[in-house]
Amino acid sequence: MNTLYSFRRCPYAMRARMALRYSGVAVQIVEVSLKAKPAEMLALSSKGTVPVLSVDGRVIDESLEIMHWALAQNDPQGWLLKDDHQGQEHSAALIEENDQVFKVHLNRYKYAERYPEQPMEFYRSEGEVFLRKLDTLLEGRDYLLAEHPSLADIALMPFVRQFAHVDREWFGQTPYVRLQAWLQRFIESDLFTSIMKK
């Protein structure tokens, strides 16, 4: 049986679960306590971070790699934008900016007390640069790069959700109304609610 070691609230694990669920790959999900990680997970991946997928004797311990693996099995709505080379490049660049830049600002905003060099609002405004970019991409369409969800939407959504949830009142009154609607659509989707069940 394919096994995914996951942590329900981890955005990396969320995006891996969404891709696996969407592709219809059957996996047994093991919910990990980050304070007491299971020995069998650590034996598969010494990094000790979720998600970790054990499938057909292979171990994949990067969320993006898990997503690509799942979509290679089955991609019914065309998340990989196979016939759109420019879209694929744009997708890769967005995901890289999310993972390398936005995630740093998100962490500092969410845990501002750990980074007393600057006030919380400073870290928030740093992260807002990315939110503005995404909101602009949503002009005239419901998803970031196409008329349907793509890998980029799913890879970014859990991080945007986390940023929005630090101060929901603030996020709700921002001018990023397209991004708010995009996030809400995903939060209410069957795909997301199914992978967040306890």
Image (cartoon, grey):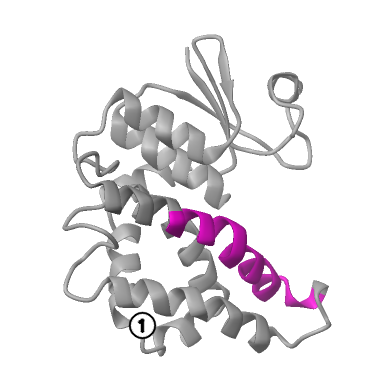
Q: Camera-side residue: 90 or 146?
A: 90
Measured as percent of width and height from the top left, residue 184 is found at: 32, 67
In the image, taking residue 14 as reference, residue 74 lies left or right, namely left
Specify whether residue 180 is in view.
no
- Vertical placement of residue 105 versus 29, above or below: below
Question: Is residue 96 found inside the magenta-colored segment of the image?
Answer: yes
Decide: is 135 above or below 186. Answer: below
Magenta residues span 93-113
Q: Position of residue 97 (x, y in %)?
A: 52, 61
Q: Looking at the picture, does residue 99 appear above or below residue 133? A: above
Q: Which residue is mark 1?
A: 176
Identify which residue is drawn at 35% across, 34% down. Answer: 21
Residue 42: within the magenta? no
Residue 42 locus on image (x, y percent)? 75, 25
Q: Secondary structure at mark 1?
A: loop
Write the residue at 81% across / 72% down.
114
Q: Residue at x 44, y 38 (%)?
A: 17
Question: Which residue does the image show at 36% across and 83% down from the upper left?
Answer: 176
In the depicted structure, whether residue 143 falls above or below residue 135 = above
As drawn, the residue found furthest toward the front would be: 86
Is 59 placed left or right of 195 in the picture?
Answer: right
Q: Callout 1, which amino acid? A: Tyr
Dot 1, how many residues are within 10 Å of its Cα: few (below 14), some (14-19), or many (20+)?
Answer: some
In this rendering, position of residue 33 left or right of residue 75: right
